[in-house]
Amino acid sequence: MKQILLALLLLGNMATVSAQSERYIAAMTKQTSDLDSAGTFTPEALQQKGNTFERIADAEKNQWLPYYYAAYTQIMQTFILKDKSQVDPLADKASANLDKAEALSPKNSEIACLRSLVATARLSVDPMTRGAKFGPEAGAQLAAAKSFNPENPRVYLLEGQALLFTPEQWGGSKTKAKETLELALSKFAAFKPESDIAPKWGEAYARQLLQNASK
Amino acid sequence: MTKVFTPLFIFICCPLLSIAQYVISGKVTDAKKHPLPGVNISVKDSYDGATSKPDGTFSFTTSEKGEVILVAALMNFQTLEMKVNTGAGQQLNIVLKESASALRVVTISAGSFEASDDKKGTVLKPLDIVTTAGAGADIVNAIKTLPGAQQTNDREGLFVRGGTGYETQTLIDGMLVRNPFFSSLPDVPGRGRFSPFLFKGTTFSSGGYSAQYGQGLSSALILESTDLPDRSSSSLGLSVIGVSGGLEHLAKDKKASYGVEADYTNLSPYFGVVKPTQTLSLGPEIIGTSANFRIKTSSTGILKFYGYGNWSKMGFDNNSIEYPGNTESFKLRNNNVYTNLTYKEKIGDGWHLYIGASYSVNNDNIHTDTLQKNPAPTLIKVRSELSQGRVMISRNLGQFSVLRMGTEYQYAVERSAFNSYSANYTDNYNAGFIEGDIYITPSLVGRVGGRLEHSSVIEKWNLAPRVSLAYKVSNYSQFSVAYGDYYQKPEPQYLRVDRGLDYMKATHYIVSFQRVASDYTFRTEVFYKKYNNLVKTTPSYSNNGDGYAQGVEIFWRDRKTIKNADYWISYSYLDTKRNYLNYPFRVQPDFAATHTASVVYKHFISKIKTNLGATYSFATGRPYYNPNLPPDKFMSEKTISYNSLGLSASYLTNIHKAFTIFVLSVTNVIGNKQVFGYRYSTDGLRRSEIVPNVPRFIYLGMFMNFGIDRRQDVINNL
């Protein structure tokens, strides 16, 4: 009887552990489900989402995804904010979150992609003076992302984006952008996220960029 | 079994049963009671929390019971943790304080213009210097568009706030540069000897500078060299006046680098097409070389070497005004070597060490027959050598304050020969300084320091106190005041004649206000400078000269109003008089203009990858000496006003894999007549105008950089 009780007790404890994990999955699923929607892409909504991810991250402490998504929302804010003076503090915040994420999950292609975007965000503040520093850094992070996982479609999406928006004199090219974005889309088609809450953003954006590149 | 099941059921469902919901709500404001939106409020180590609304209010439910830690966090604010009882149901009033980093800590700013990438809130970027139209990528020419600097374009040097070019000192990584300009011909300014690309930070102080530096009565130009390059590269330049090439190598472990550069400039083909006002007799030719290495000795230590060697020769023939019908010739051969080795390291907690050493030598050989009508030309040789060492220790005090102290030693050998007559001397110069930047609050800082100096040739000590205060009135605006004494040895040409001379002295008083926002800068300064002990050459050599300078300066820079464009306007009003050298009494000196203004405009046209720039400079006429006037009218006549419009266009492109820039620049586009003064014959019957050698200079050049993949450089649209 005692043994059964003990076994059941253990079972009960395990149930609570997995319940907690279920709570994590549930919260993350809820927060990531509408991440790509247009309603999320306002500075306020992104900030709110970023705050939520940071709360989850700080409560969990051993999951890299909440830190990753917190950084993602902060980077996206930098691209839609009109006040350029906020870019550096947000980029600092995103970098700090990515550091924590990387400590939990080193050599992660997705994290390197976001680091490339952080460099791009910093560059956008003052391209004339910052180009020489952050341009190559953005490229280097993307190269690292590709070496960590050549099947990550977001690597090709960001490459295509850079090719599309870089003037031809500087090595940009619409035709190359088109090729790279088509490659990105084929990688998206083949890509299976590790879980429901793993990063999977960007397919719609890749299509939109491809339209621009095909013009 | 049921007996067992009941407690078990309760056990498993316990977490569920205990989920009673408690509401936590309230409002977040800053210290001035303004609501703060976007604050992340959470129960520590739980998912429960909310983001505050635009009115600062928040409300959420938590299942945590009893006393919990509530965390409120917002970017640029200090994160606040507080104990809250979830059951109390009270309305929380949370007040967040701005974090120190976001408070934009006040900095000492009176008298100084800083160009830096690293520091926030600087007025200029290093690239601004390179892209100023009409400046020809010369640091000093670009600085001349800032308030306080004069448009004195007939002699080399920076003439600041009623001071001569000699009164400005140039420093590279803390070490003095004795001859920062190419030796010049009479009436033609020499360019700076080093490329602006070598420096990551440039500080131009038009007065009130720190006790770390001395021996400049008016101004200091403080240059800080770059650290390790991002990657290896090589470069090639080609222009209408010469060629240049360079190599920079970064070690694989990215802990060391070296670089070499060489250039050759020959102006004679150019002057063959565009005839200068004077007739060419030698060169002008310049060979320049430079080398550097940088080694990271640890994660915090760096050893840097920078050195250059230059050889130049040039000569011109003029029609003599003394003896009409004759020509006078002037030929100059110069060589100059400068080396600079510095080491910086963090030593222990909050302590920093700096050690520097430098050796430089400059030789001028001049052949001239301008001085007398004499078949044998006069030979003038001037050689100056300078060895120097410098040690500085600094200590961080608290979060922002810092204490610096250091010592400096210079050994100078000054030789000169005039035909067979020679006059040489050596000088041992010692200095010690101590200075503290004391933050009373993050928005109020005081810099208090002093400098003690001794020169063996003068055989006297001097002690120069320096004080500055800066107070930040808002995030962007601050007031500063500065006071300081500045001593300087008289110029070698006077010291070698009379050794009884004393230090010259200037005392600065500066009040300034500046507002530096992200896309515009406004700055104004009022100054008063008192000169004492200036050198007099008549009736005999003495330190009986004196004078003053006072004025108002305004600077406005705007990067917002015109899209893709950036412009700045500077204006200086200067009232100065001095009695020095052979002046009979106090007058406005011949290098000072009352009103000086510059407008610098830069426009980037991204469609054609072209940078367009225009610089317009204006200065009212400068006094000149007319010997035909009675003595009481000394220096009472003035030249015509100075006007100059420079234009430049640079086109950025890629040739094969090389990042390439084409540059076209034209000085004095409109062709305004520029007269800097007049030279009279001894009898006063004839005079000649002092004018630029060529009224307009057209420069076309191409610069290629290999090995740097700059594809990502202009991703503006992301």
Image: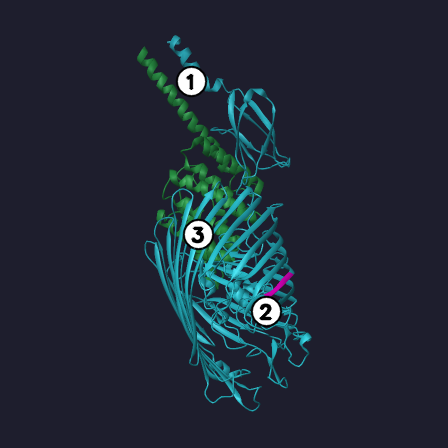
Percent x, y for residue B691? 59, 78
Q: Amino acid at mark 1?
A: Ile
The disc numbered 2 marks a residue on which chain? Answer: B
Q: How many angstroms separate mark 3 from mark 2 (CA)?
A: 33 Å
Which residue matches tag 2? B580
Q: How many angstroms separate mark 1 from mark 3 (CA)?
A: 71 Å
The disc numbered 1 marks a residue on which chain? Answer: B
Which residue matches tag 1? B12
Q: Which mark is residue B406?
A: 3
Report crowding for label 1: few under 14, some 14 to 19, many 20 or more residues within 10 A (C-alpha): some
Percent x, y for residue B498? 49, 70
Q: Amino acid at mark 2?
A: Tyr
Q: Secondary structure at mark 3?
A: strand
Q: Is residue B300 magenta?
A: no
Read off the magenta span: B545-550
In this rendering, which labeled residue sits more in front, label 1 or label 3?
Answer: 3
Compared across the picture, whether B253 is left or right of A200 comes to left
Q: Residue furthest top?
A: B3
| Nearer to the camera, B8 or B89 | B89
Q: Which mark is residue A168?
A: none
Q: Are marks 3 and 2 on the same chain?
A: yes
